[in-house]
Image (cartoon, helix red, strand yellow):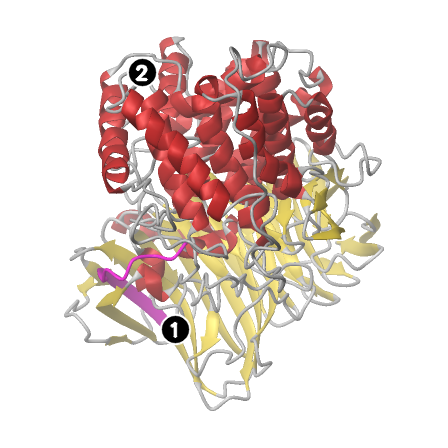
C-alpha cells in the first residue's frame, strides 16, 4: 500500500510540495563506494546522544502503559508486519516492495522510506509486534543499504519534487536511524546521513537553487533535520547551523521563523496572528502547524543540553499556539479557510491536522513551566475533549486520524495521558470575534457554534491548486461561509470535498456557467476590498468586493456576525454572462443517507431526492439538526435534496498525496437564491442561524434590523450598535465616511465609541462623521486592523 503525505505528516513536521523541478539526471554518477564499516561500541557520540534519544522518544514514545497505547501498538504491528512480510532484501536490482519500483525520481522513494520507518518504529517500541526481533533488525539494516545505494545517496540528482530530497525523505531516514542508531556503526550512520548532509547541509537555502532562501515551515523543517542529523554523527557545527537557521542568524533575522511581520501577506507569522505560506495562502491549518511541530521538536530534543534554545525564543514559540492556531480550531479540527489546497487530501482532513496540532501543543507543554504550561495543556485538553468525531486517544486505523508525529500515535497518546493524569483542565469556550487582516481571514466563536469565511483579495489568493491537488477548488475564495456545529463535528471531514457541488458553496454568488478553463495555480483576487471591523467579542462585520474569474459577474457582499447568527447581504449583483446567477444560502452535507426535515413558513418542503422545490418569497426556513434561515427580501429560493458521489482521487492526483478511487456518496440539502440571467444591481438579504430551533428562527430577526443594502453601503443595527460596510464614500443612519471603510458605532460603558478599519488596506486615513461630529482616523500601515476611537 503506497504511503502518501498523510503518513508523512505523521512522520514529523513536514511541509507540502513545491512546483520546483530539475532536469538534470537523477544519478549524476554511480553511488560512491564505502569501505566496510567498523563496529563501534557507541555509534552516536556521547556529547550529542541525548538529542538522538529525545528524537527517538518522538517516534517510539515513553512506554506509558494504557489500553489505548496497547490498541495503537496493535494497529502499528498490523501495518509493520505486513510491510515486513512483503519486504524483499534480496538485492540484485530487485525492488524492496513489488509495487514500488526502484529507479530515479521521487514518486516511490518516499513510500519506501515510510514503510521502512513503520517497521523500524515497531521494532524499537517496547511491546511492538516486531519489538527487538534480531531478524527484523537485520532486514532493516539491509533495506537501509539497498535504498541508500539505489535511491538516496550523495550522488543522486533531484528529479521531480525538491521537497522529497530536502525534507520528506530526510525526515523518514532520521526517524528510522534514531530508532536503530545503537545497532549501527559510526561509519554506517555517517553513510546514511551523507545524502542528508548534501541536501540539507545548509538549512538556510534551497539545495537545488541556492538563490532561494528558505522561509516558514520549510526553514523550520530543515533546522530540525540539521539538529538531529548533526547529532547522529556528532557534527556539532551542523547542529549549531540548524539552531541558527530557526532565527536566520546567517541572514540577519530576515527569514526568522518566529519573526512577526507587520505587512500584508508574505511568508511567516504576522503581528495580527496571521500565518502565510507560498506568499499569498493563509496556512495556519497546515504549514503553520508543520512549522510549529518542527519548533516543538527542536525545543524537545535540545532540552537539557548545551544546545537548548534560549528561553526568550521558546517563549515566542509557546505563544504562537494561542495566537495563531487556537482561534481556528473547532471540535479538535482546523477550519477549512486556513487549510489551502490541503482541503483535497483524503489523509489530511481538518481532524487529521487538528491531531497534529494537539501533539505539537503537548510536546511544547512538556518543556514549558508555570502558567505557560497550564495554558498549553488546557488547550490540548479542550481539543481532546471536544474532538469526539475523531477521538484523539482512540485510533481505529493507523492511517486515519493518527495524531503525529508518529504513524499510529503511540507518543501522542502517551503524552496526552500524561497531561490528563496531571489534572489539567480543558480551556473554556470563550466568545470571540477576531479579524486577521494580514491573511484576509476572520473567525467568529460563540458558546455553541463558530463561523469563518473563505475570501480573497489582491493580497490573498482565490485558491491554491498545485501538484495535482484541490482540483475543484474553483470558488473557495469567493466568499464561502463556513459554519461549525456541535452536532455535526465531522461535516467537512466526512467526504465533503469530493462530493459537494463545487459551484454552489454556501455564501458564494456565482454564474452557473463554465469554470475557468485555465484553473490552477495560486491566483490572487482582482479587488483589494476584503476585510472587516471588530466591535467586541460577539459582534463584527466583514465585506468583499467580488468579481468572478472572468470579470463577467460583480457583487458587493457583506456578513454581519452576531451571537445568534450571521446576516448576509449582497448588492450590485450584475452579470454580462448569459448564464444564470445564483447565491447559495446553504449546501449542507447530511451524511450518507442523511435525513432531516426542511420546513419553510410552517410547511414541510418536499425532500424527494433530485426534485427541486421552488419556494416563493419565503420568510424563513428551518433544516432539522442544522439551523434556521431568515429571508429578508423577496427573492425566490430553490430547495434541492440530492445524493452526490465522488472519489478523493477526483480532487487530488498528487504523486505522494493522491486519494483513493473509492466512490463516496453523501446527501446534501441546497438552498439557493435565483437571480436569473444578466441581472443588473440585484440584491439578496438573508440570515443564517446555526443550530437554531424553529422558535429560535422565528424570533432571531428581532436581534437586528437591515438599514441599507446598496452597492455603496450595507448596514445593520443590532441592539444599540451600528455595523456598516462602506464600499465608497457614503452615509447611513446619521453616519458618513469619506471612503471605503468598515465601521461599528455603539456604547462602551457610558461613552459612545467608534471602530473603523480599511478593508482595502490602501488608504492613509478615513474621515467619519457621526451626527455632525467629524473624526479622522489614521489607517496607514494598519493592514486592515480595527482602530477604536472614543467619541
Q: Is residue 427 left or right of residue 440?
A: left
Which numbered disc, 1 or 2, marks the residue that appears first in the sequence? Answer: 2
Q: Position of residue 22 (x, y in %)?
A: 62, 61
The residue depicted at 50 percent of the width and 25 percent of the height is 361
Of the 4 image quadrants, the one containing the C terminus is top right
Q: Quadrant of residue 714?
A: bottom right
**Quadrant hosting residue 352:** top left
User: Considering the numbered disc 2 on the image, is that residue within a helix, a strand or a loop?
Assistant: loop
Q: Estimate the x, y position of residue 612 in percent, counting from the top left.
A: 23, 76
646 shown above or below 110: below
The residue drawn where x is 69% and y is 59% is: 459
- Extreme-front residue of the structure: 35
To which residue does mark 2 refer? 126
Is 340 located above or below residue 196 in the figure?
below
- Residue 500, disc: none
Question: What segment carries the magenta color?
Answer: 657-672
Judge by depth and name the residue closer to the eye, 431 or 521. 521
Amino acid at each position: 500500500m503506497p504511503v502518501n503525505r498523510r503518513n508523512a505528516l505523521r512522520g514529523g513536521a513536514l511541509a507540502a510540495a513545491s512546483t520546483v523541478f530539475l532536469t538534470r539526471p537523477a544519478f549524476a554518477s554511480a553511488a560512491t563506494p564505502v569501505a566496510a564499516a567498523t563496529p563501534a561500541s557507541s555509534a552516536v557520540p556521547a556529547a550529542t546522544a541525548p538529542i538522538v534519544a529525545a528524537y527517538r522518544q518522538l517516534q517510539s514514545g515513553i512506554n506509558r502503559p494504557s489500553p489505548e497505547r496497547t490498541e495503537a501498538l496493535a494497529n502499528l504491528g498490523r501495518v509493520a508486519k505486513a510491510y515486513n512480510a512483503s519486504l524483499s532484501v534480496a538485492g540484485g536490482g530487485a525492488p524492496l516492495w513489488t509495487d514500488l519500483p526502484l529507479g530515479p525520481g521521487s514518486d516511490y522513494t518516499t513510500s519506501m522510506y515510510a514503510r521502512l520507518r513503520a517497521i523500524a518504529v515497531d521494532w524499537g517500541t517496547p511491546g511492538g509486534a516486531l519489538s527487538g526481533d534480531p531478524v527484523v533488525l537485520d532486514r532493516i539494516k539491509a533495506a537501509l543499504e539497498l535504498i541508500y545505494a539505489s535511491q538516496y545517496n550523495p550522488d543522486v540528482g533531484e528529479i521531480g519534487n525538491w521537497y522529497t530530497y530536502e525534507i520528506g525523505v530526510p525526515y523518514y531516514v532520521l526517524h528510522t536511524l534514531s530508532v536503530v542508531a545503537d545497532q549501527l556503526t559510526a561509519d554506517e550512520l555517517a553513510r546514511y546521513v551523507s545524502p542528508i548532509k548534501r541536501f540539507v547541509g545548509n538549512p538556510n537555502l534551497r539545495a537545488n537553487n541556492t538563490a532561494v532562501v528558505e522561509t516558514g515551515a520549510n526553514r523550520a523543517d530543515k533546522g530540525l533535520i540539521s539538529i538531529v542529523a548533526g547529532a547522529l554523527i556528532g557534527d556539532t557545527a551542523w547542529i549549531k547551523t540548524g539552531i541558527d537557521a530557526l532565527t536566520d542568524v546567517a541572514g540577519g533575522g530576515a527569514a526568522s521563523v518566529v519573526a512577526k511581520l507587520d505587512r500584508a501577506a508574505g511568508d511567516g507569522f504576522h503581528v495580527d496572528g496571521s500565518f502565510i505560506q507560498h506568499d499569498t495562502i493563509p496556512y495556519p491549518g497546515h504549514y503553520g502547524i508543520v512549522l510549529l511541530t518542527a519548533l516543538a521538536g527542536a525545543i524537545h530534543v535540545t532540552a537539557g543540553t548545551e544546545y537548548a534554545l534560549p528561553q526568550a525564543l521558546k517563549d515566542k514559540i509557546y505563544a504562537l499556539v494561542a495566537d495563531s492556531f487556537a482561534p481556528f480550531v473547532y471540535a479538535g479540527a482546523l477550519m477549512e479557510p486556513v487549510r489551502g489546497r490541503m482541503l483535497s487530501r483524503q489523509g489530511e482532513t481538518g481532524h487529521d491536522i487538528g491531531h497534529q496540532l494537539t501533539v505539537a501543543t503537548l510536546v511544547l507543554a512538556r518543556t514549558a513551566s508555570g502558567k505557560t504550561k497550564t495554558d498549553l495543556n488546557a488547550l490540548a485538553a479542550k481539543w481532546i475533549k471536544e474532538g469526539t468525531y475523531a477521538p484523539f486517544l482512540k485510533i481505529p486505523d493507523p492511517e486515519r486520524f493518527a495524531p503525529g508525529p508518529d504513524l499510529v500515535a503511540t507518543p501522542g497518546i502517551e503524552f496526552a495521558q500524561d497531561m490528563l493524569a496531571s489534572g489539567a483542565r480543558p480551556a473554556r469556550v470563550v466568545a470571540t470575534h477576531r479579524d486577521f487582516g494580514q491573511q484576509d481571514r476572520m473567525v467568529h466563536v460563540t458558546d455553541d457554534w463558530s463561523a469563518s469565511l473563505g475570501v480573497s483579495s489582491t493580497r490573498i489568493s482565490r485558491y491554491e491548486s498545485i501538484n495535482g491537488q484541490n482540483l475543484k477548488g474553483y470558488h473557495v475564495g469567493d466568499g464561502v461561509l463556513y459554519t461549525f456545529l456541535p452536532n455535526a463535528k465531522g461535516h467537512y471531514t466526512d467526504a465533503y470535498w469530493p462530493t459537494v457541488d463545487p459551484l454552489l458553496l454556501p455564501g458564494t454568488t456565482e454564474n452557473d456557467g463554465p469554470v475557468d478553463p485555465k484553473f490552477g495555480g495560486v491566483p490572487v483576487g482582482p479587488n483589494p476590498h476584503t476585510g472587516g471591523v471588530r466591535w467586541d467579542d460577539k459582534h463584527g462585520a466583514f465585506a468583499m468586493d467580488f468579481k468572478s474569474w472572468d470579470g463577467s459577474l460583480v457583487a458587493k457582499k457583506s456578513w454581519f456576525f452576531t451571537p445568534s447568527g450571521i446576516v448576509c447581504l449582497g448588492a450590485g449583483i450584475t452579470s454580462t454572462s448569459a448564464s444564470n446567477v445564483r447565491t447559495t444560502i446553504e449546501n449542507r452535507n447530511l451524511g450518507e443517507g442523511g435525513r432531516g426535515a426542511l420546513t419553510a413558513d410552517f410547511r414541510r418542503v418536499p425532500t424527494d431526492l433530485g426534485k427541486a422545490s421552488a419556494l416563493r418569497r419565503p420568510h424563513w426556513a428551518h433544516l432539522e439538526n442544522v439551523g434556521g434561515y431568515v429571508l429578508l427580501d423577496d427573492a425566490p429560493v430553490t430547495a434541492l435534496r440530492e445524493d452526490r458521489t465522488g472519489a478523493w482521487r477526483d480532487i487530488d492526483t498528487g504523486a505522494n498525496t493522491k486519494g483513493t478511487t473509492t466512490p463516496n456518496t453523501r446527501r446534501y440539502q441546497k438552498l439557493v437564491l435565483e437571480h436569473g440571467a444578466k441581472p443588473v444591481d440585484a440584491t439578496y438579504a438573508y440570515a443564517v442561524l446555526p443550530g437554531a430551533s424553529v422558535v429560535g428562527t422565528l424570533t432571531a430577526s428581532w436581534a437586528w434590523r437591515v438599514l441599507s443594502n446598496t452597492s455603496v453601503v450595507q448596514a445593520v443595527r443590532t441592539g444599540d450598535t451600528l455595523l456598516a460596510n462602506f464600499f465608497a464614500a457614503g452615509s447611513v443612519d446619521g453616519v458618513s465616511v469619506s471612503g471605503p471603510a468598515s465601521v461599528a458605532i455603539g456604547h462602551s460603558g457610558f461613552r459612545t465609541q467608534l471602530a473603523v478599519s480599511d478593508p482595502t488596506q490602501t488608504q492613509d486615513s478615513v474621515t467619519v462623521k457621526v451626527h455632525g461630529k467629524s473624526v479622522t482616523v489614521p489607517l496607514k500601515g494598519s493592514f486592515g486592523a480595527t482602530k477604536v476611537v472614543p467619541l
